Image (tube, helix red, strand yellow):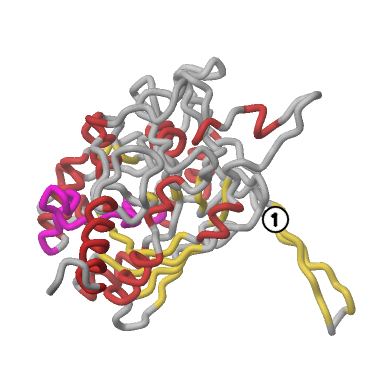
Amino acid sequence: MPPSSPSSRLTHLTATVMSTSATSSTPPWDPNATTFPLRSSLLPPRPNAPAESSWNWGADDELGRLNLLTPARTKSAAATQIQTGEVISLNLPLTVPSTPGFGREPFTHRIKPLWPGIAYDDTYSCNTQSGSQWDGFRHFAHIPSGNFYNGVRKIDIEGDASTPANTKCGVQAWSHHGIVGRAVLIDYWSYANAAGNESKRYDPFTSHAISYSDLATCAREAQNGLDIRPASQGGDLQIGDILLIRTGFVDAYHSSSPERRKAAALAGHHAPSSPEYVEGDTQHWAGIAQSQEMLTWLHDGYFAAVGGDAPAFERWPSEEKWHVHEFVLALWGMPLGEMLDLEGVSRLCRERGRWTFFLSAAPVNCEGGVASWVNANAIF
């Protein structure tokens, strides 16, 4: 075929586009790329950005790693993951927990009669983070620098006498995009409570730390040999996956007395690094460990979002001088789900012998919102 023919030029163009988009190493990153920088080689994307920040999707970006949920990845996830059509909700009742932790207001519901016996409205009053929730990018800053994701600062969120607040990085951006793709569940709670694993058992109402090694062993031994390394390292995890970890809080909550639930939630909620922390008075929740190995896995996996059933996702309180929240939300821009109801989906995963499924979540469209109800379903 002559080099100047239309077919040869199209072939050359396609090869050029694929080769230039296969790797993203300089900002702005291409969401369709198949290779992204490792944590060990990540450089700040612009002057004055905190070390380890990954603000590489553009100066006006409000999606962070949700950018990885491209139409192509979502279409592929739907094609491969929706097999039986079974749907499982990942949302706890809005009244659970009855006493929210971390000083949050409980949900209240009021019926408003419009025409008694004929027509009614109702009103909700709640803290969006009192139950099943997505922590938004305005929720938790990188403490040393005071930066939220992509350079948002306190003044952007609160404003002051001379500068009005704005909506940058509010959850409205997530609402417009959606959180829709392939999800992967690691059911560590079932693994830790299986026969023969007595030494691994723990109380989710304590600050038990779950290591990367714990998760990897659980997936390998109890979940059909699932390899939780990224595909680029020979594992089963794909770019843009939504990672979910079941650590047992919801199960423990339902099996605990009302008195125990309330006492656990009403303990102090300030981290040891906070000036308001009172020694010995703090909430304790099991979650993932604060370790460099865990951070590297979370970063290099290029998850679109992460979440679990625990109140803080990470072990609380942190025994380090930093929190996983700082990295996941402020530095890397990954939505973080907490108190998801993973009971039903874990049972169905075990029955079906598969640990991936299609997930669709619709965050609320609140301009400048800090967080959102999960509003998520798993589809098999």
Q: In this view, does 322 lie to the left or right of 15?
A: right
In percent of width and height, residue 133 lies at 52, 52
Quarter of the image containing the C terminus? bottom left
Taking the spot 45% from the left edge, 20% from the top edge, the residue there is 272
Residue occupied by mark 1? 108
274 to 75, vertically: above or below: above
- Write the start and end of the magenta stretch as one range: 224-250
Crowding at dot 1, Cα within 10 Å, few <14 / some 14-19 / many 20+, comes out as few
In percent of width and height, residue 333 lies at 43, 41
The kind of secondary structure element at disc 1 is: strand
Q: In this view, does 32 lie to the left or right of 195?
A: right
- Residue 146 in sight in this render: yes
- Residue 252 in sight in this render: no
Taking depth in this image into account, of 127 and 61 the one nearest to the observer is 61
* Number of disc labels: 1
Taking depth in this image into account, of 308 and 145 the one nearest to the observer is 145
Check the image and name the residue furthest to the right. 115
Quarter of the rendering containing residue 160: top right
Majority secondary structure of the magenta segment?
Answer: loop
Taking the spot 63% from the left edge, 57% from the top edge, the residue there is 365
